[in-house]
Amino acid sequence: MSVEGRPLDEQEQILRAKNGDVAAFEMLVRSHQQIALRVAYLVVGDANVAEDVTQEAFVKAYRALPRFRAEGSFRPWLLRIVRNEALNNRRAWGRQERLALRLAHDPVSGGAAPSPETTVMTGIERETVLAAVGELPDRYRDIVSLRYLLGLSEAETAATLGVPLGTVKSRTARALDRLESALSALKEVGDD
């Protein structure tokens, strides 16, 4: 696990994994598994399929490790493999229905349980926003999902999607404009 009693950092794990150390690759898998699952889920919309896609993506990443450049960032590289595998899976199954997105968790402030009214309203608001995100065209939905639901930086999002940083910025602005319009329209309908 370590050289001198200290845990391996990610660069050491990558180097060892490139040299065939399966335990080092397992450490990489453990540290990136949750976000990889969420990326796959955001694309395929099914938890079981997302698990299968993620496993296959990790196998492909392991096989592609010799081509990974050490100066690159591992997480976006891996998430791009996961996303591509998920897109391939979605195309293979012909899934075109609206994606059901779920946030990983709902943080509760101060450790106190929210009131039942707050829980219902928060759930309705979250579902409304997620439904609006699900209605966006793929290029915008991917940007919003990676940036705001998974918390990736603009640079990580660009690397994951394989697009220039400027594209991430412009698509983010357009996606947020569309979301604002869609949510405003829903609010007006709800107020009637």
Image: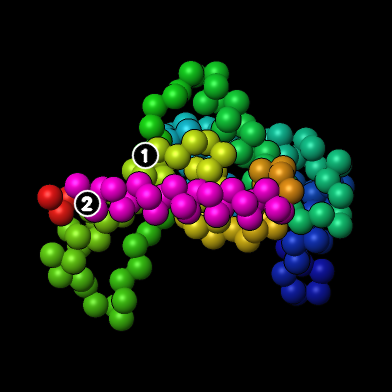
Q: Is residue 35 left or right of residue 97?
A: right
Q: Is residue 77 left or right of residue 191?
A: right
User: Which one is nearer the viewer's eye here, 12 or 128?
Assistant: 128
- The amino acid beneath tag 1 is Ala
Residue ID at (56%, 53%): 172
Determine whether label 1 and label 2 are within 8 Å by CB: no
Element type where label 1 sits in the image: loop
- The amino acid beneath tag 2 is Glu
Magenta stretch encompasses residue 143:
no
Q: Main secondary structure of the magenta part?
A: helix
Q: Position of residue 156 (x, y in %)?
A: 67, 55
Q: Quadrant of the N terminus?
A: bottom right
> With respect to residue 127, does 83 lie above or below?
above
Residue ID at (35%, 47%): 182
Residue ID at (38%, 32%): 98
> With respect to residue 136, does 185 lie above or below?
below
User: Which one is nearer the viewer's eye here, 190 or 78?
Assistant: 190
Q: Is residue 47 left or right of residue 6?
A: left
Give whichever of discs 1 and 2 has the lower sequence position.
Answer: 1
* Quadrant of the rendered image containing residue 55: top right
**Mark number for residue 100?**
1
**Mark number for residue 188?**
2
Q: Position of residue 37 (x, y in %)?
A: 52, 45
Q: Residues within 10 Å of mark 2 (few under 14, many from 20)?
A: few
Q: Position of residue 85 (x, y in %)?
A: 62, 32
User: Which one is nearer the viewer's eye here, 63 or 173?
Assistant: 173
- Inter-mark Cα distance, 1 to 2: 23 Å
**Mark number for residue 165?**
none
- Nearer the viewer's eye, disc 1 or disc 2? 2
Asked if residue 102 can be seen in this view, the reply is no
User: Which one is nearer the viewer's eye here, 3 or 172?
Assistant: 172
Magenta-highlighted residues? 165-189
